[in-house]
Amino acid sequence: MSTCTTTEELLRLYCSLPHTPARTRPYDRKLARHWLEHGITPDTIRAALLLGVSRRLRRHPERPPLPAIRSLAYFQTILDEVLAAPLDNDYLRHLERLCRSKPDPTSPSSTLPMADTR
C-alpha cells in the first residue's frame, strides 16, 4: 500500500492505530496540515505515529494502563525525536507488524494501512 501523502490520509492512519480516537478533532487536522506545510514528510510523520503507538503496546502488562491518546499532539515530541534520528526501514516494518498484531480492543478499526518502504 502506498504511503500517506495528504492530511486526510495521515488522519485516517492516526485513527486506525490502536489507542487512538475513532474520529479526529479540528485541532488534529490543523496540526497535520501544519506539519506537512512545514516540510515534514508524510513518511516521517507515519514513523512517529508508529513509534509512539508501538511503545504503548509494548508497555509491561502489570503496569497501570495509560489513558487513550486523545489528540495528534501526543506525537509531537516523538516526531521531534524521529526528525533528529530517522528510523530504519526494517525497524518501521517491524513497528507496522507490531501495531497490526496488537489491535486496540476499544477501537472499531484495527486495519493498519501499510507503507511502501521500497
Image (cartoon, grey):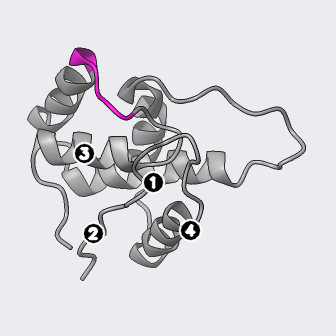
Asked if the residues shown at circle 2 and circle 1 are in contact, with their CB atoms under 8 angstroms apart, the answer is no
| Residue kind at label 1, given as amino acid type | Leu
Alpha carbons under labels 2 and 4: distance apart = 16 Å
In the displayed structure, 20 sits above or below 25; it is below
| Residue kind at label 3, given as amino acid type | Arg
Task: Choose between 3 and 105: the one closer to the eye.
Answer: 105
Q: Identify which residue is drawn at 69% across, 31% down.
A: 66
Asked if the residues shown at circle 1 and circle 3 are in contact, with their CB atoms under 8 angstroms apart, the answer is no
Q: Residues within 10 Å of mark 2 (few under 14, many from 20)?
A: some
- Which image quarter is the N terminus in? bottom left
Magenta part of the chain: 22-27
Q: Residues within 10 Å of mark 1 (few under 14, many from 20)?
A: many
Looking at the rendered structure, which numbered label has been put on residue 115?
Answer: 2
Asked if the residues shown at circle 2 and circle 4 are in contact, with their CB atoms under 8 angstroms apart, the answer is no
Q: Position of residue 6 (x, y in %)?
A: 9, 46
Q: Mark 1 against mark 4, which lies toward the viewer? A: 4
Q: Residues within 10 Å of mark 4 (few under 14, many from 20)?
A: few
- Which image quarter is the C terminus in? bottom left
Sooner in the amino-acid sequence: mark 1 or mark 4: 1
Q: Is residue 28 left or right of residue 76?
A: left
Alpha carbons under labels 1 and 4: distance apart = 13 Å
In the displayed structure, 112 sits above or below 20; it is below
Q: Mark 2 against mark 4, which lies toward the viewer? A: 4
Q: Is residue 106 left or right of residue 15?
A: right
| Residue kind at label 2, given as amino acid type | Ala
Residue holding disc 3: 12
Q: Secondary structure at mark 4?
A: helix
Residue holding disc 1: 50
Magenta span has 25?
Answer: yes
Q: Position of residue 117 (x, y in %)?
A: 28, 76
